Image: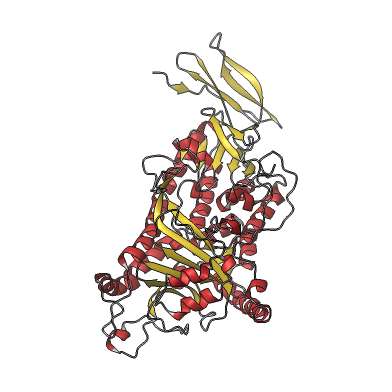
């Protein structure tokens, strides 16, 4: 068996040149050769045969060598965050994005305290700009409400067991989440949301400050050829061209073309019963979503609420400017389509029955539930409602996220249920850890090992978060029900008794431990004073913008006051590079192409 050994290397830097000692293949004698500071080191075997690999030193701002060349597939949260941090480290980064132009579409994305800490550590300006567009939810009451017993007035009550002994005590709140307390434990900014288009624009703008042409639109990654240790990867693009890079980062979402090749899958291929799609499993749940502007009695006092009841749950969240985003989760078979799908990637002609009022349909599935849900739904424009079947993946304990010079991050390898709002957060953590790992890599010889190190660093934490996210869905729908009470007959099933007895365990053990673990990754360190200052500043801005929107809706009506939650962006796309490339992100998700 042959083992590689590196010949003795003596490097003497004189301005831009150096000398390297290498063995002569013909004589075996050592030769002194001039070399640029970009040092290439040829490897030889013990038998004297040379390998073809030329390993190069990789630079950082304070380290000689050449910049690491990185190709990133996909310009989502994980891809753009990776690009920014890598550019700041001095890497040569190019993002290859499916859409020919970015469009403003889609609803808010949740950033928990752990993700905010990572953003702060990556770049102070990035963090400040995100905070300027942020809506805090974790500073206010968040938790689980009784979907049947909440009295319909959006009142604020305690989550104690007093209602068991006092028939007049309110039972609106089941359990409140300790989001603020757990953030305070580490001195972190509080959980909240930012509109996806605002986040996207901030990340792109910050990247362009470092490399104006960092992103190539309308020409996505379709495949790759790994060239072996030290030789990088050849990336195949949709227009038939290829580009070379040291590594390829697959950040192209749940239906990843990069993952499809790495794991031997077929992009978006579904089983006959739709329970499997490109290696992902149907979660058992479909979700409807919408958005409205509505001033409820508890608007300024609550962040997000989860209404529980028999076999389903309903979530509302303040997303800023007086807007309430809602989700309705149902245990239905995959492909049970009523509304357009795609989270912004569809048009109304995809509705199963274009004449059906989707708000009324969702209300019919919540018959007997609190009027609080009905009030939110009644204020929602029916044309804004969309639907998505939820798929996720089991943790990849037996397969690495990396193979050769290619690595997967974010939803491309660990999509997760939305219940904990950690999908985007974990993609941001991936971006940070991957960049830090690569920055510590001094030679192309070590790149493949570094990608494996990244996988080992992330697999345990990500798997735990995946498990907690999935567990939250399964418990709420399959194990939770309307809690038992001695004063009415609303909760009499065995699940109702189980839910009742779960209350103190959830309140004093499980939820505190869960959120404490989620927030335990905070590379920025404590920033307690910053968190308090941000909250105070935000309160004033939030109140002003919300009141302005409430007045506008009162005057003009919902359909005029706000865009649809999944509004199609009306933009002029630039010249398309290739025939068949989607002109906008909307068309890309729908599957439309330009001719």
Instruction: Left or right? Give the position of 511 relative to 94.
Output: left
**Of the pair 497 and 545, the residue shown nearer to us:** 497
Q: Is residue 532 above or below residue 70?
A: below
Residue visible at 39% across and 83% down in the picture: 158
**Of the pair 211 and 416, the residue shown nearer to us:** 416
Q: Is residue 527 above or below residue 35?
A: below
Q: In this rendering, does residue 124 appear at all?
A: no
Instruction: Left or right? Give the position of 164 relative to 15.
Output: left
Q: Quadrant of residue 542?
A: bottom right
Residue visible at 64% across and 20% down in the picture: 33
**Of the pair 154 and 113, the residue shown nearer to us:** 154
Q: Residue 210 placed where, x, y %?
A: 69, 48
Q: Quadrant of residue 15?
A: top right
Q: Residue 222 placed where, x, y %?
A: 57, 37
Quadrant containing the N terminus is top left
Q: Residue 414 placed where, x, y %?
A: 45, 49
């Amino acid at each position: 068996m042959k083992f590689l050994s590196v010949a003795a290397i003596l490097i003497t830097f004189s301005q831009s040149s150096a000398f390297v000692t290498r063995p002569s293949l013909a004589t075996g004698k050592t030769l002194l050769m001039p070399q640029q500071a970009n040092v290439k080191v040829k490897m030889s075997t013990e038998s004297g045969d040379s390998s073809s690999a030329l390993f190069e030193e990789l630079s950082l701002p304070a380290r000689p060598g050449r910049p690491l060349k990185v190709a990133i597939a996909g310009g989502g949260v994980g891809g753009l965050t990776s690009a920014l941090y890598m550019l700041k480290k001095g890497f040569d980064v190019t993002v290859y994005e499916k859409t020919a132009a970015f469009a403003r579409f889609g609803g808010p994305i949740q950033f928990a305290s752990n993700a905010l800490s990572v953003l702060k550590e990556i770049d102070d300006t990035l963090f400040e700009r995100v905070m300027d567009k942020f809506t805090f939810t974790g500073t206010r009451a968040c938790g689980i409400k009784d979907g049947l017993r909440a009295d319909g007035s959006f009142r604020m009550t305690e989550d104690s067991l007093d209602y068991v002994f006092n028939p007049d005590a309110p039972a609106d709140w089941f359990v409140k989440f300790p989001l603020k307390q757990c953030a305070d434990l580490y001195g972190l900014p509080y959980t909240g949301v930012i509109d996806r288009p605002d986040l996207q624009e901030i990340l792109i703008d910050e990247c362009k400050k470092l490399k104006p042409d960092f992103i190539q639109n309308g020409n996505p990654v379709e495949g790759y050829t790994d060239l072996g240790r030290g030789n990088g990867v050849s990336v195949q693009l949709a227009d038939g061209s290829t580009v070379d890079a040291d590594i390829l980062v697959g950040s192209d979402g749940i239906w990843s073309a990069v993952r499809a090749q790495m794991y031997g899958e077929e992009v978006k291929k579904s089983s006959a019963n739709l329970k499997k799609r490109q290696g992902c499993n149907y979660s058992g749940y479909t979700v409807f979503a919408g958005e409205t502007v509505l001033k409820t009695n508890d608007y300024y006092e609550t962040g997000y609420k989860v209404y529980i009841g028999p076999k389903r749950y309903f979530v509302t969240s303040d997303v800023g400017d007086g807007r309430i985003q809602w989700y309705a989760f149902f245990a239905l078979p995959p492909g049970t389509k009523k509304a357009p799908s795609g989270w912004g990637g569809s048009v109304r002609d995809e509705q199963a029955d274009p004449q059906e009022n989707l708000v009324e349909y969702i209300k019919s599935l919540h018959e007997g539930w609190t009027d609080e849900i009905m009030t939110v739904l009644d204020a929602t424009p029916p044309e804004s409602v969309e639907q998505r079947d939820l798929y996720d993946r089991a943790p990849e304990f037996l397969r690495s996220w990396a193979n050769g010079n290619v690595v997967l991050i974010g939803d491309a390898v660990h999509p997760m249920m939305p219940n904990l709002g950690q999908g985007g957060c974990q993609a941001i953590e991936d971006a940070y850890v991957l960049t830090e790992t690569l920055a510590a890599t001094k030679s192309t010889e070590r790149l493949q090992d570094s990608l494996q190190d990244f996988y080992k660093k992330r697999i345990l934490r990500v798997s735990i978060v995946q498990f907690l996210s999935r567990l939250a869905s399964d418990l709420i729908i399959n194990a939770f029900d309307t809690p038992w009470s001695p004063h009415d007959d609303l909760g009499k099933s065995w699940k109702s008794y189980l839910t009742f007895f779960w209350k103190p365990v959830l309140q004093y053990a499980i939820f505190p431990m869960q959120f404490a673990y989620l927030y335990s990754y905070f590379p920025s360190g404590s920033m307690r004073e910053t968190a308090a200052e941000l909250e105070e500043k935000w309160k004033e801005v939030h109140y002003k913008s919300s009141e302005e929107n409430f007045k506008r809706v009162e005057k003009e009506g919902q359909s005029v006051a706000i865009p649809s939650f999944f509004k199609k962006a009306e933009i002029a796309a630039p010249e398309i590079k290739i025939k068949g490339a989607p002109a906008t992100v909307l068309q890309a998700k729908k599957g439309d192409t330009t001719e």
